Amino acid sequence: AQSVSQHNHHVILSEAASLELGCNYSYGGTVNLFWYVQYPGQHLQLLLKYFSGDPLVKGIKGFEAEFIKSKFSFNLRKPSVQWSDTAEYFCAVNAASGGGADGLTFGKGTHLIIQP
Amino acid sequence: GAGVSQSPRYKVAKRGQDVALRCDPISGHVSLFWYQQALGQGPEFLTYFQNEAQLDKSGLPSDRFFAERPEGSVSTLKIQRTQQEDSAVYLCASSLYEDQPQHFGDGTRLSIL
């Protein structure tokens, strides 16, 4: 079974600060990795995903994440945050497969607050 | 475009009652997932459909939980004899094919009194 650990449950930053949210997973096989964001009052939205290839993936709104296989990590980064980035961020993983789908295993989430 | 639609948005029920939660996936999406999200936690997988076939129900917490997708589009999650620990947000997600990113609905917030 997979598990996902997000290091920080609450993060408070000032606008223009750099952001890094940690995510580690536990699974013995090949995985797909995701970051989802939930803005206040909205549904979960996909920020970015890693299936294979270049371990540095770029997503929407200036976010990027790096898959480091040796560390079982998929940390989310943004060089300069904005007030509108205030949201809940979830790291998720599922088993990569040639056929069939696998439900996502989520971390507990990180509540990010950006102060103007 | 139309996203995943869930209804009702909020449901309050007394302990012991049965409830039914509906999910309309994005049109044409083959895969459909149900998740349960307790307060302060990440979503937890309940069950997965590929078209009308329920291929994985390993996450359903008890036999009081039942899901169906009879025509391969709309899905219903039913909880019988509800208990207080069933209080949570129930999320539905769909994807076009296997191994494609999942698109989530707004969820149904279920409160059991």
Image (cartoon, coloured by chain):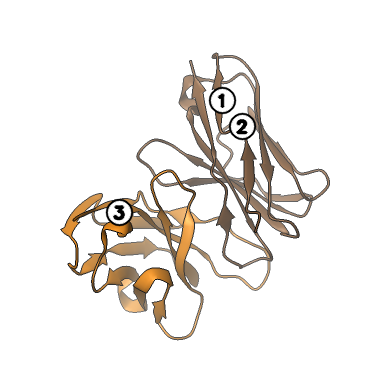
Chain colours: A orange, B brown
Residue at point 23%, 54% (across, down): A8
Camera-side residue of B19 and B47? B19
Query: Tag 3's secondary structure?
Result: loop
Query: Mark 2 sits on what residue?
Result: B8
| Amino acid beneath label 1 | Lys
Q: Chain of mark 1?
A: B
Label 2 and label 3: CA atoms lie apart by 27 Å
Q: Is residue A5 left or right of residue B37?
A: left
Disc 1: which residue: B11
Give residue A35's mark: none
- Going by the numbered disc 2, the residue's amino acid type is Pro
- The residue under the point 64% across, 23% down is B80
Alpha carbons under labels 2 and 1: distance apart? 6 Å
Residue labelled with disc 3:
A86
Residue A66 can be seen, yes or no: yes
Is residue B77 shown above or below A68?
Answer: above
At mark 2, the secondary structure is loop
Label 1 near label 2: C-beta < 8 Å? yes
Residue A23 placed where, x, y %?
A: 32, 63
- Residue furthest toward the right? B71
Q: Quadrant of the C terminus of chain A?
A: bottom left
Pointers 2 and 3 in contact (C-beta within 8 Å):
no
Residue in the picture at 35% in, 39% down: B40
